């Protein structure tokens, strides 16, 4: 468990306030809770503040404590407990590299090395052009596409060192690379396409199976005609 402290005084802003639009969002969260329970909106308020500024400053914590009528220490406890809150300035693009076991076994070391080379040798440090910072994070729930990283709300998956370097440089040029797998596969299908559950008719169950099978066979024929191969479908998947 790492120690999480607020950033040094020299980088702390002197004040904080929510933009009018974000203040509306915070008010909506506060309104969800009964009178006297406005403290329940603390995580939402910190998150909205972080979306606005990129990180959580001491001034922001003080502001939210006043807004929610909470002692400063209570808001500080929340901000320092959850690692999703950044306690120091971040780059325009915060690169969160998963280094938990599946990603580590699939080569997250190479992804980290690319970040060290193209962003900064140390995590939590803004690059010289102010555009990037990077950090290691625990599993982001995309292990089937390991190794992966998150930037903003986008996942970039099936990475290696060169792909990560290309991704960072593309963002630096102002391009917006397509999120998702970076090795050409679709979602978490095998490279080259699905190999199972190809027969839609064979996997439909239930009282209307005969009717559904008839429709499915028709549908499969149509799909096959459209894309040249039977489309895969998971049990229970609605189309
Ligand atoms: S271990 Fe990396 S996404 Fe799960």
Image: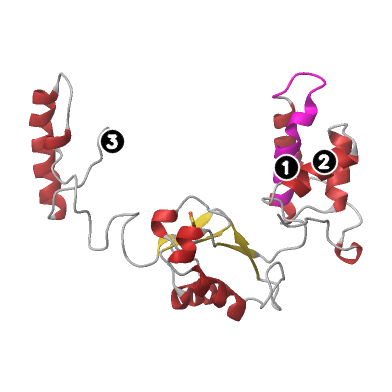
Q: Quadrant of residue 1?
A: bottom right
Q: Nearer the viewer, residue 204 or 177?
A: 204
Relative height, residue 28 to residue 85 (above, below):
above
Verify CB contact (< 8 Å) between mark 3 and mark 2: no
Who is closer to the viewer here, 105 or 164? 105
Q: Position of residue 143 (x, y in %)?
A: 44, 55
**Crowd class of label 3 (few under 14; some 14 to 19; many from 20; radius 10 Å):** few
Name the secondary structure under disc 2.
Answer: helix
Classify mark 3: helix, strand or loop.
loop
Mark carried by residue 237: 3
First to last magenta residue range: 32-50
| Residue 46 quadrant | top right
Which badge, 3 or 2, comes first in the chain's sequence? 2
Residue at point 31% right, 61% down? 185
| Contact, mark 2 vs mark 1 (Cβ under 8 Å) | no
| Separation (CA) of disc 3 from disc 2 | 43 Å
Residue on which disc 1 sits:
22
N-terminal-most mark, 2 or 1:
1
Q: Position of residue 169 (x, y in %)?
A: 53, 77
Name the residue rendered at 58%, 56% in the picture.
152
* Residue at point 56%, 77% (across, down): 113
Of the pair 89 and 219, the residue shown nearer to us: 89
Give the numbered dot on residue 194: none
Q: In this rendering, which labeled residue sits more in front, label 3 or label 2?
A: 2
Q: Is residue 105 left or right of residue 238?
A: right
Whole-percent x, y for residue 207 in the image: 15, 18
The mark lying in front, picked from 1 and 3, is: 3
Which residue has dot 2 on it? 75
Can see residue 123?
A: yes
């Amino acid at each position: 468990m790492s120690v999480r402290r607020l950033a040094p005084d020299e980088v702390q802003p002197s004040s904080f306030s929510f933009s009018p639009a974000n203040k509306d969002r915070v008010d909506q969260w506060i309104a969800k809770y009964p009178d006297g329970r406005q403290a329940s909106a603390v995580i939402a308020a910190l998150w909205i503040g972080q979306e606005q500024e990129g990180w959580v400053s001491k001034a922001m914590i003080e502001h939210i404590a006043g807004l929610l009528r909470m002692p400063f220490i209570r808001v500080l406890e929340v901000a320092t407990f959850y690692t999703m809150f950044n306690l120091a300035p971040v780059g325009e693009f915060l690169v969160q590299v998963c280094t938990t076991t599946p990603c580590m076994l699939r080569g997250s070391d190479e992804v980290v090395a690319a970040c060290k080379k193209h962003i900064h040798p140390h995590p939590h440090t803004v690059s010289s052009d102010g555009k990037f910072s990077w950090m290691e994070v625990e599993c982001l729930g995309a292990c089937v596409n390991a190794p992966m990283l998150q930037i903003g709300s986008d996942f970039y998956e099936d990475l290696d060192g060169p792909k990560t370097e290309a991704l960072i440089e593309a963002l630096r040029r102002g391009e917006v690379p397509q999120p998702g797998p970076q090795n050409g596969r679709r979602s978490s299908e095998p490279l080259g396409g699905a190999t199972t559950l190809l027969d839609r008719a064979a996997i439909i169950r239930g009282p209307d199976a005969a009717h559904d099978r008839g429709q499915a066979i028709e549908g499969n024929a149509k799909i096959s005609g459209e894309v040249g191969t039977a489309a895969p479908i998971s049990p229970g998947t609605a189309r």
